[in-house]
Image (cartoon, rainbow, N blue to C red):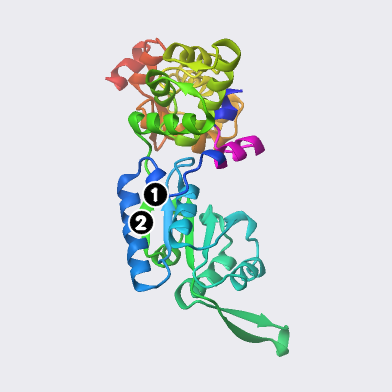
Amino acid sequence: MTERFVSETLNRADVEFDLTLRPGRFDDFVGQGKVRERLELSVAAAQGRGDVLDHVLLCGPPGLGKTTMAYILGAAMGANVKATSGPILAKPADLAGLLTNLEKGDLLFIDEIHRIQKSVEEYLYSAMEDFAIDIVLDQGANARSVRLNLPRFTLVGATTRSGLLSAPMRSRFGTTNRLDYYSPDELRQVVERSARILGVDVSGEGAAEIAARSRGTPRIANNLLRWVRDYAQVRADNRITSEIADQALAMLDVDRHGLDEMDKRILATIIEKFGGGPVGIGTIAVSVGEEPDTIEEVYEPYLMQQGLLSRTPQGRTATASAYRLLGLKPRAGEQRELI
């Protein structure tokens, strides 16, 4: 049950819940102050020139607000937002259909843009730079290329793995903006705002308790808030205090550090089965019964951010903090390496 709340793959109910709480303008967006300021300036400049917004790349871990920011940009520019994702664009014809249906000033949002096929990506180059695409008609000796002019539009790309974007693609974005993990105070503001929208009675201490366990991610904070709301409705007369939040999150096995059962299982496996490491990600995945990609993308970043796990050329290694967290002591052979 816990994994569903911290996983970055939302089910239908999660998506509807997320849309309900999604800010619609810059003033409502909490956190990411530098990114927000840069984008507001870009919007003001484009509007002052009567021009379309330059192409924007948003990168960072899942759940930090990249999609939300794209829709805020569209609202700020008074533009229609047409959204798709990289894996869906399997062939050039898919992209051509999207581009030819755009109107002047429209914002095309491509999520997970690093997963676009190479052949499709090459079509984007001329579309982004020249606002035109070349379409090949017929085949063989009768083949000919026809250039279609496109209206001036803005491409907003979002990626969780900017390193996988090719250099030609990155260079065609006017600005690249990285969204970072949120501080506990920023997450507390996110929880309090979401609680007001949902009509949930939450104390400042209760909101802070939820925020502290949300792994620096607003999406997780909102998901945990929904669970705590349900718990308070059934067992606490609809009032969320610090104590009630603690009890509710304990049912999900989410501790005060934001670690859940799988996080601790990964650390315990490295320490107890493999002497603290180094051990390969594939071996860890088999040992805990999880996919390697899920461990790398969902669990590992937070464990490394908290200083509980380190990567070495030989594999993953548990740190001294991980031993202390689990209440374990290094064996004699491990003690020297952890000091």
- 18 and 289: which is toward the camera: 18
Q: CA distance from mark 1 to mark 2?
A: 9 Å
Element type at mark 1: helix
Classify residue 244 as left or right of residue 134.
left
Write down the residue under mark 2: 39
State the extent of the magenta-drawn residues as a range: 7-19
Q: Main secondary structure of the magenta part?
A: helix
- 320 and 47: which is toward the camera: 47
Above or below, comparing residue 117 to residue 234 in the picture: below
Mark 1 burial class by Cα count in 10 Å: few <14, some 14-19, many 20+: some
| Quadrant housing the C terminus | top left
Write down the residue under mark 1: 26
- 278 and 58: which is toward the camera: 58
Toward the left, the furthest residue is 339
Residue displayed at 58% across by 66% down = 120
Classify residue 211 as left or right of residue 84.
left
Q: Where residue 62 sits: x, y (%)?
A: 48, 41
Toward the bottom, the furthest residue is 141
Above or below, comparing residue 35 to residue 54 in the picture: above
* Quarter of the image where one finds residue 256: top left
Q: Is residue 13 magenta?
A: yes
Q: Where residue 248 sits: x, y (%)?
A: 53, 15
Looking at the picture, which amino acid does disc 1 mark? Phe
Q: Earlier in the sequence, mark 1 or mark 2?
A: 1
